[in-house]
Amino acid sequence: MRKASEIAEILLTYISVLLGVIAVHVFCHYGKISMEQVFFIDETILQMTWVKQIVLFIIITSLILTFAILLLPSKKLKIALSLVSVSFFVFVFSVYEYIRYNISYSTFYEDEYKSISPKDISFPENKRNLILIYLESMEQDYVGQNIKPYLDSLQNNNTSFLGFKQLDSANMTIGAQFASLCGLPLKKVASNKDLLNFMPTVVCVLDILKQAGYNLSYLKAADTAFSGAKLFAEQHSFDNIKGYDELSPTLKEKFGNVDGNLFGGLRDKMLFEAAKSELKKIQQPFMLSLTTLDMHHSPEYFVDETCQKTFGDIRDAVRCVDNNVKQFMEWLQQQDFFDNTTIILVGDHIGHVGPSMYPRKAAVFNTIINNVNGLSKENHAWSTYDLAPTILQAIGIDVPYLGIGRSLFKSDKTLLEKYANNFNFMLMAKNRMYNDFDQKFDIDLSFRPYSLGTVLTNQQTADYIDIGNNTFCYNTTIMSLDIGKNTKDNMELETNILSLAETFDIVLNGHIIFSNKELKPQKRKLNIPINKEWIEDDGKVVIEVNFTQYNRNRPAGICFDNFVLK
């Protein structure tokens, strides 16, 4: 039998090699990334065939390299290679920054967050429409080559901003959209089942427009469930939310096959076709948001068969997107609403590509078409967060700030200019004010009728949940029940709970009925006595889950099953 020390050596060597192989693969394809991007990996991605193939390749490669290292005669060389492997992993996945963020507190948001109340905002008498197009991974420059002539002409002949810097938490689509519309980072980024909420009490661009009477539509080439996009849209005022599942049946009638990028989703030209249909029926004033997909680099960008393939790399996809945008813009220019519509095209984030893909200036493409008369841009160093107030100003709403964003049409310094290289740290360090945003809910409760004694399974409890997507069970839960005037002595709540590694209180109508103090996942059955005096005379019951110990990167959530109030 092998000695325990030999087995330990083999295991440690394999783990170190595995980490190194993973880091090499990620660095070659995506460059240096943040741990937040890792936590954002969605389980739908893990089910894709190409991902399974990559995982298998990494495992086999690591095994081969492990045995090769173990055969080396020098123990010092073995240790050195293992340390190099682990160190490269630490570098590629920004582990040092992740640790630093999680052991640090700041008062940044107390000092710099600027809230706006919709009632204090003055709109022009003739409200301008807004079309906001997020172009997946679109950058300003591609080796200085003229591969996107139309987009470049738009940028040269309209308003655009230089000086962009991408920051953590805005380096993936949903994080960038949240930052650009709410002026805040989405720090709790995890997979669908763990992405708890999108701060519904925070006032975003969308909420301001909704209260002003705008009709809001959200069209996405990918599935709206991915990365919590539908939850974001629902919590921040969108009326009409459609993605691949909702749009593809109609588009198939016209185009046949609608699938594009191997990532899954509609082809960009078909998303623009869906946008035309939406714009023909939406009432003014409106705000339409589009999120494209063809440029998504994982697993591979998409080039439509109608587009010319010249370079054999991502530049072909850039040229194709350029042509799709041109056709859509030419259609828009023929519409009656065009002159009263501000159109903003912006790359959601810079491309997730390795260092060898091409030399480039890491800045998102951006241009504002038909902004209000008299607006002139200022020269700023800026980030995605500054787009929020800038978008509002572009449609004639004079606001200098929103959240931590500062308008690029104003002369005041952006926070990136104020804090320079320390800005990223200030964003991501722990902060109590930000935690309050993340935990607080202000929603209309549904109070669906519930008869005492009715047993609800997990799927059925979803019907009573007012916030959170119960599809994956784990969520921040607020349940509202209407039991009528049926209160009685000796009431009891009986339920099975499945919770993640977080401390929390279960609260019924403001009364704590259960407290979990254990920082570990658990499944348990609860039998909790309920005082009838806690129930309002109208029979309304609100059951909340309040997480009591904040940890930005620990998944939090709870699932009720076999729920019965009797």
Image (spheres, rainbow, N blue to C red):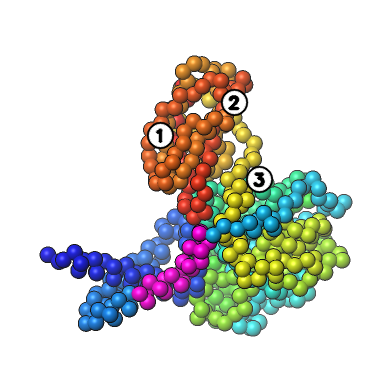
The quadrant where residue 427 appears: bottom right
Graded by Cα atoms within 10 Å as few (under 14), some (14 to 19) or many (20 or more), the crowding at tag 3 reads some
**Residue 370 % position (x, y):** 80, 65
Considering only vertical position in the picture, is 232 above or below 383?
above
**Marks 3 and 1, how far apart in space?**
30 Å
Instruction: Determine which residue is flagged by label 2.
Output: 540
Asked if the magenta segment contains residue 550, the reply would be no
Q: Quadrant of the N terminus?
A: bottom left
Query: Which residues are the magenta region?
Result: 83-103
Classify mark 1: helix, strand or loop. strand
Contact check, label 2 and label 1, Cβ < 8 Å:
no
Instruction: Determine which residue is flagged by label 1.
Output: 496
Amino acid carrying label 1: it is: Asn
Graded by Cα atoms within 10 Å as few (under 14), some (14 to 19) or many (20 or more), the crowding at tag 1 reads some
Residue name at image x 47 percent, y 50 percent:
555
Considering only vertical position in the picture, is 224 above or below 164?
above
Instruction: Determine which residue is flagged by label 3.
Output: 201
